[in-house]
Image (spheres, rainbow, N blue to C red):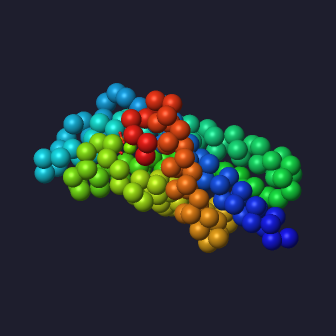
Amino acid sequence: MAGLGTLELVAGALWAMLPAYVPNNAAVLAGGGRPIDGGRTLNGRRLLGDGKTWRGTAVGTAVGVVLALALDAVAPAAGDAVGFDLPGFPLAAAVGLAFGAMCGDVAASFLKRRTGRERGAAFPVLDQLDFVVGALALAALFAPAWFGATFSLARVAVVVVVTPLLHVGTNAVAYWLGLKDEPW
Ligand code: CTP
Ligand code: MG
């Protein structure tokens, strides 16, 4: 049935990416403290800016890893419940997805500062996909066999299309709740 096939594809893709979705949101809640760049500048502009902190990065990564391991524990039962297999998360995959998501976000801030954008300025497309690229890249690097078995081209395509929509939605909610300074 085409409908179930699509549901299975989208659900499997989003499930596999959950450990990469949560770190950025956890960082927003945990942020503050010392910036990673320590205030250093490059050509008169901050290397990363005050929006990338050690605490936000560490807490974001930790929350993503813990979520991945929790999902790994419930994957068989959740798969039974929905009627199709959902991927589990070996530790290397968990760390790759969570830390990769944070690294992608940090890399995006580096690019924003180099292009003259102040902290909090929007950089469409980069803002929505920086953490996807980082998460997939580090997951592929840390857990290549898991990555190959989990991320079919179809799942990657779903992730690239659906993630920006989820990202825009959750950031708008975080803004309305007063958790974030800008709605992106
Ligand atoms: N945050 C953090 N450490 C990170 C990522 C985020 O502490 N590695 C926290 C910061 O308090 C940051 C907030 O989460 O201000 C929102 O994250 P983000 O939108 O990524 O940062 P911005 O402040 O918008 O800065 P930038 O322009 O560099 O993206
Ligand atoms: Mg921002």
Q: Residue at x 50, y 49 (%)?
A: 168
List x then y, in percent, for residue 51.
34, 38
Q: Name the outermost residue toward the top.
A: 33
Q: Residue at x 86, y 51 (%)?
A: 80
Residue in front for this viewpoint, 128 or 90? 128
Whether residue 28 can be seen here:
no
Residue in front for this viewpoint, 165 or 5? 165
> Would you say 180 lies left or right of 69 here?
left
Position of the N terminus by quadrant: bottom right
Total labels drawn = 0
List x then y, in percent, for residue 165.
55, 55
Whether residue 43 can be seen here:
yes
Q: Residue at x 37, y 29 (%)?
A: 32
Q: Residue at x 17, y 46 (%)?
A: 45
Q: Name the outermost residue toward the front.
A: 176
List x then y, in percent, for residue 68.
64, 45
Residue in front for this viewpoint, 149 or 108? 108
List x then y, in percent, for residue 174.
50, 36
Q: Please tell me in which quarter of the rendered image ligand 1 is found.
A: top left
> Would you say 181 lies left or right of 172 here?
left
